[in-house]
Amino acid sequence: MTSDAVQPCPVADAHRRLMDCHDQWHTLHDSYLDPDGFRLNLNSLVPNLRNVTWLLQKQKAAIPDFATWYPEFQQACKKSEIMGWVVKSRNRITKESDLELLSSCQVVWTRNWIERVEATAKFPPRMSTAEIIHAMRHSGTPPFGVISVRRRWVDKALPAWELLAATAEAFSRLSQILWTAHNAFGIERCDLGDRSTECVTSSLNDSLMRLPCMHLAQSELQAHFTMSGGIINEEFESVDLSPAALKTSAERYGELKFPNSGPIENVTGFMAIARTMAEKDGHHGTFAFLYDGERVVATQEMEFDNQDTKMLSFEGLADLVESTRADGVVIIGEIWLAMPTEKEKELKSIFFPARDRLDRMEGLTVYSSTRDGRQAELLSMIERGPSGEARCGEPVEIDFPTGVNTLAPIRRRWADMQKRGL
């Protein structure tokens, strides 16, 4: 875009309608446990999503290069299961009948990093996830691992998609095409005012990332528990990379050169930063950086106090991968390592986790993986001084990432996204 000054919106009718859809999406979310309310709000939202493109097309004669870039959007829509569903559903709602909605719960038992069991359970639509968990805990559940319960409304014509996710996906595509229309006029910001709902603004996305508010709202429809530890609460904390935060970091650690290439290439740069911080602080937290190509699209500080919450944290990171359309990830954090004993080598399939071993060693690792199958890792062993101070050794390359299990949820999600055309 060529100008960052506020200018009159060049496609005001379509843009306002998109903002209406944003408001309606949150109303749809708020009515999730009310079957009639959910149906009513969905019947309002879907036609409005369709109307955004109609309103845009009415102004095509005035939009620069419309005949060049809009047909590309149309071709992408023809290949999109979601956009095809929006068109067909609008016709069904306005001319035939309501959508055929089905309510269910997806129950996922995560036994360990690799083994997961998924099932669909039937509960009354007005039953909250907390009430479902209470019922499940008193009906007999597996003795270990994490049980995740996700409330789902689906349309019979689109069974692979939960409807909040489907409409959020459609919204993202429409936001991107309106961004393209603004870009055609050279407009960075238009004069449409924000709404009373704090997150409903005139901002547009230049990618298919879902809005953070939609990502967080969808997470409210799921809950997690273990038989031993009870309900597990999810927390999301992004990494602050604002100028003020970077200035504070520079005062503590000195000037840190943030790597600015792709996720694989950035492993070396992140390791240099991680070693500096670990030696200064005596420890290092776990952080994730999600990439679209060479651009960081999300950052996440990950906190966990046992294996169950660690698995859940990486499952949540996989949700964020889909919401941001990330195709690469970098993980930074400390790990425990241990060499297998002779008895473990003999038994082959049995290996006691390093965290439970007396002879465990401490390491700092930075590992990366991409959707196209590339991966990289550097490992720096940590030695402790008499007062507990940390010294990080020279990094070494690891052919088989120590974090391979933690990436399993993300790889599963990429495979699922491929099946759904994302």
Image (cartoon, rainbow, N blue to C red):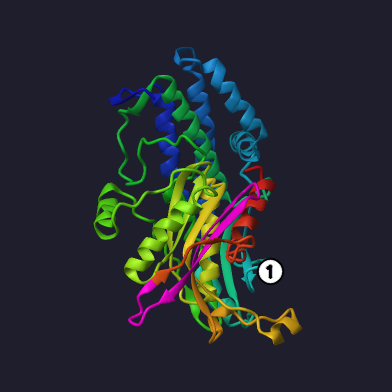
Query: Residue 237's image quarter?
Result: bottom left
Residue located at (64% from left, 35% from top) = 84
Mark 1 element type: strand
Q: Is residue 178 visible?
A: yes
Main SS of the magenta part reads strand
Left/right of residue 80 with respect to residue 176 in the rendered view? right
Q: Give above or below for 137 relative to 171.
A: below
**Does 389 lie within the magenta span?**
yes
Nearer-the-camera pick, 135 or 93: 135
| Residue 317 horizontal/vertical position (percent) | 51, 58
**Does 278 lie within the magenta span?**
no
| Residue 186 horizontal/vertical position (percent) | 38, 21
Q: Is residue 131 visible?
A: no
Q: Quadrant of the N terminus?
A: top left
Q: Give above or below for 353 relative to 401.
A: below
User: What's under tag 1, amino acid-wise?
Assistant: Val
Q: Residue furthest top?
A: 61
Nearer-the-camera pick, 335 or 243: 335
Q: Give above or below for 82 relative to 245.
A: above
Q: Which residues are magenta?
A: 364-390
Nearer-the-camera pick, 231 or 292: 292
Q: Give above or below for 115 relative to 68.
A: below
| Residue 146 horizontal/vertical position (percent) | 58, 74
Residue designated by label 1: 117
| Residue 126 horizontal/vertical position (percent) | 53, 64
Nearer-the-camera pick, 334 or 237: 334
Left/right of residue 71 with respect to residue 2 in the rendered view? right
Q: Quadrant of the C terminus?
A: top right
Query: Residue 99's image quarter?
Result: top right
